[in-house]
Structures are given as C-alpha cells and as structure tokens.
Image (spheres, rainbow, N blue to C red):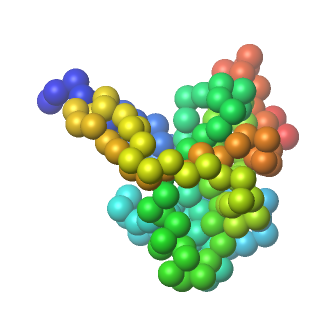
Amino acid sequence: MSIIHKQKLLDLEFGEKGERDIYGLINNYLCIDAKKTKDKYCSFDMEDENNCIEIKTRRYNINSFKEFFFSHKKLKYADDRNKCVSIVFNLTDGVYLFDYTKHQDKVRIVDNQFCRKDRGYVERNKMCYCPTEYFELIKCKRKYDGDSDTT
C-alpha cells in the first residue's frame, strides 16, 4: 500500500470518527432529527426532510484561518430539493456551525480552486469559503486536557 493511499485512509477514518462523535450534538443544537446519510458518497453527511448538513472534521482551531471551505457542488443537491444547508466544522478547539442558508451572501466562491494533492492527484473544485466570524460555537473543547470536551 502506498504512503498516499495510507494517508487517504487515515484522513477518512479521522473524518468518520469526528462525524460519529457529534451527530446527537448537531440534532440537539438545531432541534431537528436528521439522520446519517447511507454511504460516504452522499452529498451530505446528515439529512432530514428540510435540512442538509455537511460535517468537516479538521486538525485546526478556529483561529487558524479567517475562512474555512467546502465544495460548492454540494449546494446544487440541496437547492434541487429546496433544503436548508448547514456546515458543521469539528475543529480541535470546538464544534462550530456555519448556517449557509442564513449567511450565503457572506460566502466567497472561487472557481477551479486548487484544494490538495496529498492523495496522489491534484484536486480542483469550485469552493465556498465561509468567514469564521459567522460561525456559531456549538461545543467547546479543552486543548490542555487531552482534547476532552467541556460544556
């Protein structure tokens, strides 16, 4: 197995664990009953009749960047179904919600954006950049105590 393939598997495992840990938290915060989508190729990670939720687990804290991003192609799926879109960023210092439906006018869209090449090929996509000043803190994490959660 190549180093690149191993890294991709580690990234997927990291993301999936981050998602599993916060499904209930997201539903409670948004007062909904969204379900995990059926497989990893679905457009969003959670969905109900009115909402599409994407979860991005990252090894950064909220102050690492002024913007975090997600793929623009996800929006067509939600638009076609007339659903609200929320992006949840599970970061090292906390879990944050970006309400795309509410703040879409604040999103910067960049076409043909270089994203990454650590998986053995160059990925280019149309990307949505979300300013962190519009993130809502759902749950804080303490970095100094083995990343244990606080409430």
In the displayed structure, 148 sits above or below 50; it is: above
**Left or right: where 88 falls relative to 133:** left
Quadrant in the picture for residue 69: top right
On the image, the x and y values in percent for residue 42 come to 41, 66
Residues 38 and 114: in front is: 114
On the image, the x and y values in percent for residue 95 come to 70, 43
Residues 59 and 22: in front is: 59
In the displayed structure, 63 sits above or below 68; it is: above
What residue occupies the far front of the structure in this picture?
111
What residue occupies the far top of the structure in this picture?
144
Task: Using the rendered image of the protein, determine whether residue 43 is visible from the camera's viewpoint.
Answer: yes
Task: Using the rendered image of the protein, determine whether residue 147 is visible from the camera's viewpoint.
Answer: no
In the displayed structure, 73 sits above or below 132; it is: below
| Number of marks in picture | 0
What residue occupies the far right of the structure in this picture?
151
Quarter of the image with the C terminus in it: top right
Name the residue at 22% across, 33% down: 120
Quarter of the image with the N terminus in it: top left
Name the residue at 78% across, 48% down: 134
Quadrant in the picture for residue 94: top right
On the image, the x and y values in percent for residue 104 come to 69, 61
Name the residue at 65% across, 29% down: 65
Name the residue at 70% across, 67% down: 101
On the image, the x and y values in percent for residue 6 come to 26, 30
**Left or right: where 119 falls relative to 93:** left
